[in-house]
Image (cartoon, rainbow, N blue to C red):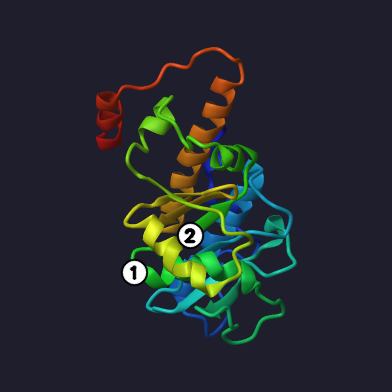
């Protein structure tokens, strides 16, 4: 990649840090810019699902208010200014020209509510991620990328489209204290204390899934990474 591709201004929305609306807290605006930029990067990576799925983040100083993408817009249309502020039940706080999707927020609300460190949650339905989630063995220790996640990946069984409140407790229990979750027959999810942290974890998890699919596509035996090497990688 060129240096320009790492410039935050490349990924930031048109309404960047200097365009903070009058009356909006500076910390909230900064977080809005970061989250909107993350939506753009996820779109660039090809991890999007039309207008569906979410990246959410807890607002600074708020225990139960979050930013989420406007329902009906593609990821490349998300702006710092049009992100929707919602509570744990998906109710819109303040004014918004766009609705939120409460049904799609079930997974996020459960994890946000359960942990103060779950400030940002990134959920994807990438082809590689869904494929690994559908395999009985899940993510296998067959690559450098997988070994970095040794002992750090949790699983949650598929219970149908996630729209029921009673699934929240099982989601949280299955995640435990981990930051990487494979939703069986569904996709991938990562948790971070920052937007950048959640994104980097998703990159590693999705990359491990991509490599596993490719390695097993040839129909020849795949070398498993020894447990001691996995432990050393994860601890590095």
| Residue underneath mark 2 | 121
Measured Cα–Cα span from mark 1 to mark 2: 12 Å
Q: Which mark is residue 225?
A: none
User: Which picture quadrant has residue 94?
Assistant: bottom right
Q: Earlier in the sequence, mark 1 or mark 2?
A: 1
Closest to the observer: 172 or 59?
A: 172
User: Which picture quadrant has residue 20?
Assistant: bottom right
Using the image, determine if residue 128 lies above or below residue 87: above
- Where does the image place residue 76, in percent across and percent down from the top left? 70, 55
User: Which picture quadrant has residue 194?
Assistant: bottom left
| Residue underneath mark 1 | 116
Q: Residue at x 66, y 61 (%)?
A: 14
Q: Considering the numbered disc 1 on the image, is that residue within a helix, a strand or a loop? A: loop
Residue 14 lies left or right of residue 2; in this view the side is right
Using the image, determine if residue 222 lies above or below residue 19: above
In the rendered image, the quadrant that contains the C terminus is: top left
- Where does the image place residue 89, in percent across and percent down from the top left? 54, 80
Using the image, determine if residue 191 lies above or below residue 202: below
Q: Considering the numbered disc 2 on the image, is that residue within a helix, a strand or a loop? A: strand
Q: Residue at x 34, y 69 (%)?
A: 116
Q: Residue at x 56, y 32 (%)?
A: 210
Using a 10 Å C-alpha cutoff, classify the residue at mark 2 as few (fewer than 14 neighbours), some (14 to 19) or many (20 or more). Answer: many
In the rendered image, the quadrant that contains the N terminus is: top right
* Residue 68 seen in this snapshot: no
Closest to the observer: 44 or 11?
A: 44
Question: Tags 1 and 2 in contact by the CB under 8 Å rule?
Answer: no
Residue 163 lies left or right of residue 233; in this view the side is right
* Residue 102 seen in this snapshot: yes
Using the image, determine if residue 202 lies above or below residue 219: below
């Amino acid at each position: 990649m060129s240096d320009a591709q790492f410039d935050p201004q490349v990924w930031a929305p048109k309404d960047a840090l200097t365009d903070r609306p009058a009356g909006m807290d500076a910390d909230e605006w900064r977080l809005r810019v970061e989250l909107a930029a993350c939506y753009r990067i996820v779109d660039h990576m090809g991890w999007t699902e039309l207008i569906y799925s979410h990246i959410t983040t807890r607002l600074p100083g708020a225990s139960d208010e979050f930013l989420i993408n406007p329902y009906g817009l593609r990821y490349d249309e998300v702006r710092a200014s049009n992100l929707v502020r919602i509570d744990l039940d998906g109710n819109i706080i303040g004014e918004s020209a766009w609705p939120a999707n409460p049904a799609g927020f079930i997974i996020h609300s459960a994890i946000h509510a359960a942990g103060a460190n779950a400030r940002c949650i990134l959920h994807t339905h990438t082809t590689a991620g869904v494929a690994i989630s559908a395999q009985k063995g899940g993510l296998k220790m067959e690559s450098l990328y997988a070994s970095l996640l040794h002992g750090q990946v949790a699983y949650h069984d598929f219970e149908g489209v996630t729209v029921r409140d009673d699934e929240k407790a099982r989601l949280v229990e299955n995640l435990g204290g981990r930051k990487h979750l494979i939703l069986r027959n569904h996709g991938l999810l990562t948790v971070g204390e920052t937007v950048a942290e959640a994104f980097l974890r998703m990159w590693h998890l999705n990359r491990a899934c991509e490599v596993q699919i490719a390695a097993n596509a040839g129909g020849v035996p795949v070398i498993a990474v020894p447990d001691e090497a996995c432990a050393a990688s994860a601890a590095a």
